[in-house]
Structures are given as C-alpha cells and as structure tokens.
C-alpha cells in the first residue's frame, strides 16, 4: 500500500452530513472485478445529470476543485454499505485525504487500507478548513500526518489527533496481510485450542 | 478465560476469539465463519493470487451470489447483463480455484447470504462471523459477533482467518413491555434508529435485551440486528435462548449429537453478566411503538406512519432536510399516510423470511393490489420460496396482483434489473432509503411487511389498520 506522509493539495468543501456510500458510488457501478477506473463514477448521481453531463451545482465540477486532493465534509461521512469501492473511487479521482466532523466505522477502516487519511476535526477547526476550501486563493492546504498538522495560508496551523496504530499504518504504507501472517504461530496455537473447546463450530463443506 | 470482572456478551465473544494483542488498542481476532458474495470478493482473490497465497480455511468459508442476481427467468442460463454475469462467474471461478464451497444460482439453497447462513445452520451463538456486506449484523440475532468488512479485510480473512480489530464500545438497548398487535420488529428497529440517529451508535456494538426482545421469534430478531448498522453500529447482538436453540436444532450444518449437547452448554453461557457495564444504555418502551415509515433519505428520518414530517429545529437542520425533502418530493409538515405510491417491494435481508411473507399475506388475503401500483414479493432464499409455496402464500400474492419472484437482493439496491425509475415512489421492506439506493432518482419509504402489504392494497402509504 502507498504510504501517506504529507499532502499539499486543493481542498474541496462538501458541507453535507451523512454522505452515504451509495452517494459516493451508486450500486450499479459496483459491477466490476477491478479496483481501477472508479473515479469516473465518484458521486455520480450528484455530480452528473441523468444523461451523464457534469452538473453546474457540484463542487468537484469547478476549477480548481476539479483537481481536489482533499475533501472537507460534515458528520458521519461514508455511512451505509461496506463497499470498498467508495475509497477506491475517491483515490482514483485523486482524493487522498478526507477532513470531516466524523466518519462511519467501516468506511474509516476502508480508507486506512487504501492510503487515504481520514481526519476528524471539531466544529471550530472544521469551519476554518471549510472557509479556506471555499476560496480558490486559500484552497490549497497542507495535511502533514507525521506532524498531525493542517496548514492553511495566512492562518494559524490546526492540530489534529489520530489513533497511533492508524497513523503508523498510513505512514509506513503497511500491508496488513503480510503483517498478520507473521503471527502464524499464534494463529496455529489458537486453532489448536479452538478445535478442542469450540469443536461444535460448523463446517461449510457440503453435507 | 480468567477474567473475574463481569463481562458483556460482546466482551465474552471477543475474549474467546483473541489470537494475539497487537498494541494497547489493536488485536488479532479469529473468524469462525466467512461468508462471501460476488460484489466484494473479486479484488480480494486477485490480491491472494498476486502473492500466491492460499485460502486458510475453505471449510469455514461459503460463497453465494445475491446482489447481481435477476429475480426472474431461467437460473440455469447465464445472466443477460454482461457485467453482472462476469462478477457472478468470477466468484464461481474463484471458489473452484481456491476450494471454497459455492452455492450455484440454480441451487435450491441459493439466496441472500444473510438469509441462508442462519437457514443452513451455519450461524451459531458465540462465534465471530464476517462478510463483505454491512448487513452482516443480521447474524447477531443468534448471539454471534457479526459485522461487515471491506474487500481488503475480505482478503485478510481469506489469507489468515483473522482480522485486525479495535475493541468497540458497548451499548445496551433495553426494550421493556411488549409490542402491540400488528406492530412488528421493523417498527421497533425504526423507532430505535430514530431515537439514536444514524450515527448514534458509531463505534459501538449494540446488545438488544429486555422482555420485548425475548418475546421475538428469530426472524424478528434478525430484522432488529440487521438494521443496527443504520444507527452506525457495526454489530448488533441478542443473547441466545431457547428460541435460538429451537431454531437451530436439526439444521443442516448445525452441530449434532454430542457436539450439539456440548454447544448448548457453551451457548447457555453466552449472555452478559448481570453486573456487566455498558458504555451507553438506552431504554425503549415497546408498548409505545407504532407502525413506522421514513420520510427522508436517511433511516433516522423514521416517524409514525400516521404522523407528519417534523419541523426542523435549527438552520443547519433546515438546510439538511431541504435537500432530502426536495429529493423526496415532499413538503415540511406534510402528512405521509395519503401519499400515492408507484411500487411496493417486499423482500431483502431485512424482511425476506417466511415469517415476513406470512405477515404480508395475512394482510393481503382476499384483497387486490390498487390499480397502477407495481407490487412485488421477493423471497430471501430458495428455501423461503419453497416453504411459502408449500403453505400456499404464493397463490395469495399472485391472486392479489403481486409479482412472485425468485430469491435475491432484488430492489433493495440498484444492482440488478429490479430498480425504480426516476421519481418513482416505493414502499419498501428493505433497510436503506438513501438517494438512488433503489435506482437513480427513486424515492423510498421504509416500512414493515404488514404496512407494505397494506400500502399495495390501498395505493398509498398505509398501515394494516387502515384496511380494517
């Protein structure tokens, strides 16, 4: 996985609450067996008209936000389904950091596994970032994960907090499967014990 | 386990599945059952293949296609839509390549993954169950810790049979009293979601308890746990009891003989200790629950079916609800009960079980679908469909003017041919009313099976009471 250390990019303000994963990428675009190319379908039903043209009233359809690398949004971003196509679509569009009032659990986890940094801010700091993102002159901001700091031109830097394990995973670009396979001995020991004390666990093999 | 402090059911299951602590907050936990569907798995298998990794426990993994599946036509023939066909055939190919049991489309056992897991006796108390689908919370009805995961985590479980997890907070939702006649588990969970809000349980696992929960049958418990995710909780739990054991006894994959006896002894311990502490406690009075629906594009907008759309309390709420009202074609303060409808959908992992179909058929018997309304019943599995036909429920639906279809996710989400058109208003027993969820521009009102049936007959949003 690609590491996330520091990102300077255009921030786009999308001040909605409860943006669900069906809105981030509608179900009909999930009929793919690849991770690539989903950026075209990002926010499809609010970004495009029924005939596929870009809508005038959507932030990512206007310069400079059509090159956004950071999305700024409200509470409970990414609620709904567990589709990892949502972070895949965001990353494919070029968005590698989301700054929000709060996130839904599964989406938050899915971001970490795709090198996308989810940042949670309180209302005051979030409104400063919203304000910067709305003006082209200040829309380019810097999010530094190792310093846990957001820098906006002409403003006091904003500090943020993030779980240490989540930060380490992003900073090092860890592959979690490779990490977990290092615990083979512990897994095998657990299975040996579990075969004894939970012998009733059903097998899925045909019967 | 040597812990002496009182523990919640969640903590007991967590402790029993702890493989290794990785840090103060992270742990490797073991997965007993991994369910796979066609949408969330292709890229995970691709990841395994790139690194030449095998599937660790094919005997604890089961694959079935449900999201993409058309609900009519000949299942022995390939799916017409090329993208859907490719996704389903890819799962079939991966299952064969990695030695994973797969239920083919034409099998009598095919169905929505969250309906067939319990049906086949694979969902058992005290286990950890995952699936690349957020409604995996359904299986929590059996006292299993069950939650949805993304594709990266699917790959992780395939390779290691474990997951790296952060311990959740716990929330007790205690439901006292009893549900009134004609009020269902769907009305109860919509009431709970309206109370908590769509992110009210984020970071928590909910345990549902209280006399009203104990009185529910397994189908109703599954409806409740299914929608835990709509309040932000990754999982919902109900401690197993005699109702649970009676449901499981004799099912195909459930333990048998001495193993059944050993399992029962363990399962009876699967309950929160009386003194266990929860991070949050919510009290609900079942006697006050009435037939519910939703007015907006978030499940938290649930209100009594007879009620009116509430006024927003501040400017922020005014802005947020205006977006929803415009999309739904509604006005603030409007009453919902006379709202004309285009489509009725009865089915999904929330309400596609035999008990749900019986409840709907009970309302419909001898009546007809209102002119201009498209009404469809989609059983949650092949087994549900055959059981319904053996009871004659199919005749009741067909005679009333309903479409009687084959098992699948159908109109719960716009991924197969069953979709709403722009502006169409649908009364649905599914779980999400998000913008475009049932098809681009479609408008969804979530209800119970009885209310969906009554609405189909009335031609507008209605509870079964309206027909009396």
Image (spheres, rainbow, N blue to C red):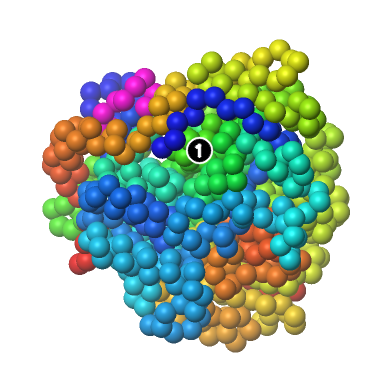
Compared with residue A205, is residue A39 higher up or lower down, i.e. above or below?
A: above
Q: Position of residue B429 (x, y in %)?
A: 59, 62
| The quadrant where residue B293 appears | bottom right
Q: Residue at x 29, y 37 (%)?
A: A178
Residue drawn 52% across and 59% down? Answer: A30
Q: Is residue B86 magenta?
A: no
- Please tell me whether mark 1 sits on a helix, a strand or a loop: helix
Foreground of the two, A181 or A186: A181
Q: Position of residue B280 (x, y in %)?
A: 53, 28
Q: Nearer the viewer, residue A83 or B66?
A: A83
Residue A156 location, quadrant? top right
Task: Say if residue B345 shows up in the picture.
Answer: yes
Residue stretch rendered in magenta on the structure: B16-26
Q: Residue at x 23, y 32 (%)?
A: A182
Residue A129, position in %: x, y?
A: 72, 25
Between B403 and B83, the one lying in front of the other is: B83
Q: Quadrant of the C terminus of chain B?
A: bottom right
| Neighbourhood count class around disc 1 (C-alpha, 10 Å): few under 14, some 14–19, many 20 upward | many
Q: Is residue B168 above or below residue B188?
A: above
**In the rendered view of the protein, which quadrant contains the N terminus of chain B?**
top left
Q: Which chain letter goes with mark 1?
A: A
Task: Determine whether B365 is above or below B17 in the image.
Answer: below
| Image quadrant assignment for residue A126 | top right
Give the residue displayed 41% in from the left and 31% down from the top: A173
Q: Is residue B282 visible?
A: no
Q: Which residue is mark 1?
A: A111
Q: In the image, is residue B21 part of the stretch drawn in magenta? A: yes
Q: Give coordinates of residue A189: x percent, y percent.
A: 15, 35
């Amino acid at each position: 996985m690609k590491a996330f250390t520091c990102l300077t990019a255009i921030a786009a303000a999308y001040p909605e609450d409860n943006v669900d994963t069906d809105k981030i990428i509608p179900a009909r675009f999930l009929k793919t067996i690849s991770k690539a190319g989903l950026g075209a379908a990002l926010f499809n039903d609010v970004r495009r008209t029924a005939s596929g043209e870009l809508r005038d009233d959507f932030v990512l359809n206007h310069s400079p936000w059509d090159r956004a690398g950071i999305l700024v949004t409200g509470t409970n971003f990414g609620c709904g389904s567990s589709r990892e196509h949502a972070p895949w679509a965001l990353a494919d569009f070029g968005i590698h950091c989301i700054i929000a009032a709060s996130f839904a659990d599964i989406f938050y986890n899915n971001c970490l596994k795709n090198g996308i940094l989810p940042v949670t801010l309180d209302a005051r700091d979030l409104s400063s970032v919203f304000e910067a993102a709305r003006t082209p002159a200040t829309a380019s901001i810097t999010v530094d994960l190792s310093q846990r700091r957001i820098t906006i031109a002409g403003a006091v830097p904003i500090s943020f907090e993030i779980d240490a394990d989540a930060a380490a995973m992003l900073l090092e670009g860890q592959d979690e499967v490779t990490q977990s396979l290092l615990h083979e001995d512990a897994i095998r020991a657990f299975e040996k014990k579990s075969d004894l004390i939970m012998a009733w666990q059903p097998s899925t093999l045909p019967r | 386990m040597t812990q002496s402090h009182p523990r919640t059911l969640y903590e007991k299951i967590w402790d029993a599945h702890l493989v290794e602590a990785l840090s103060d907050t992270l742990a490797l936990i073991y997965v007993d059952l991994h369910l796979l569907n066609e949408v969330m798995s292709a890229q995970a298998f691709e990841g395994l293949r790139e690194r030449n990794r095998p599937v660790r426990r094919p005997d604890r993994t089961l694959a079935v296609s449900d999201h993409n599946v058309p609900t009519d036509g000949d299942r022995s023939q390939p799916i017409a839509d090329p993208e859907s066909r490719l996704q389903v055939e890819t799962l079939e190919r991966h299952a064969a390549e990695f030695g994973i049991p797969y239920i083919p489309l034409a099998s009598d056992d095919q169905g929505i993954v969250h309906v067939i897991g319990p049906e086949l006796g694979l969902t058992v108390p005290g286990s950890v169950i995952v699936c690349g689908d957020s409604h995996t919370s359904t299986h929590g009805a059996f006292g299993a810790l069950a939650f949805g995961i993304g594709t990266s985590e699917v790959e992780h479980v395939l390779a290691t049979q474990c997951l790296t997890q952060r311990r959740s907070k716990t929330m007790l939702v205690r439901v006292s009293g009893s549900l009134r006649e004609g009020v269902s588990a769907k009305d109860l969970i919509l009431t709970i979601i309206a109370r908590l809000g769509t992110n009210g349980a984020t970071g928590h696992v909910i345990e549902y308890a209280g006399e009203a929960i104990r009185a529910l049958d397994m189908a109703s418990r599954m409806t409740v746990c299914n929608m835990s995710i709509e309040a932000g909780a990754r999982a919902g739990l109900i401690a197993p009891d005699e109702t649970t054991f009676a449901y499981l006894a004799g099912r195909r994959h459930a333990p048998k003989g001495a193993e059944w006896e050993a399992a029962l002894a363990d399962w009876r311990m699967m309950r929160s200790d009386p003194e266990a502490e929860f991070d949050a406690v919510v009290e609900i009075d079942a006697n006050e629950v009435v037939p519910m629906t939703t007015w907006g594009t978030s499940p938290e907008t649930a209100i009594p079916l007879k009620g009116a759309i509430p006024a927003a309390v501040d400017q922020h709420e005014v802005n947020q609800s205006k977006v929803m009202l415009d999309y739904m074609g509604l006005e603030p303060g409007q009453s919902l009960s006379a709202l004309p409808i285009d489509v009725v959908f009865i089915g999904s992992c929330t309400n596609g079980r035999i008990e749900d179909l019986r409840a709907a058929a009970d309302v419909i018997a001898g009546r007809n679908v209102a002119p201009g309304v498209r009404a469809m019943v989609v059983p949650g599995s092949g087994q549900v469909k055959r059981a319904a036909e053996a009871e004659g429920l199919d005749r009741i639906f067909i005679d009333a003017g309903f479409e009687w279809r084959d098992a699948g996710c159908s109109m719960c989400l716009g991924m197969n041919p069953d979709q709403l058109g722009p502006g169409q208003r649908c009364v649905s027993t599914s779980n999400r009313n998000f913008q475009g969820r049932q098809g681009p521009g479609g408008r969804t009102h979530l209800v119970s099976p009885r209310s969906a049936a009554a609405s189909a007959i009335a031609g507008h949003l209605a509870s079964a009471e309206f027909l009396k």
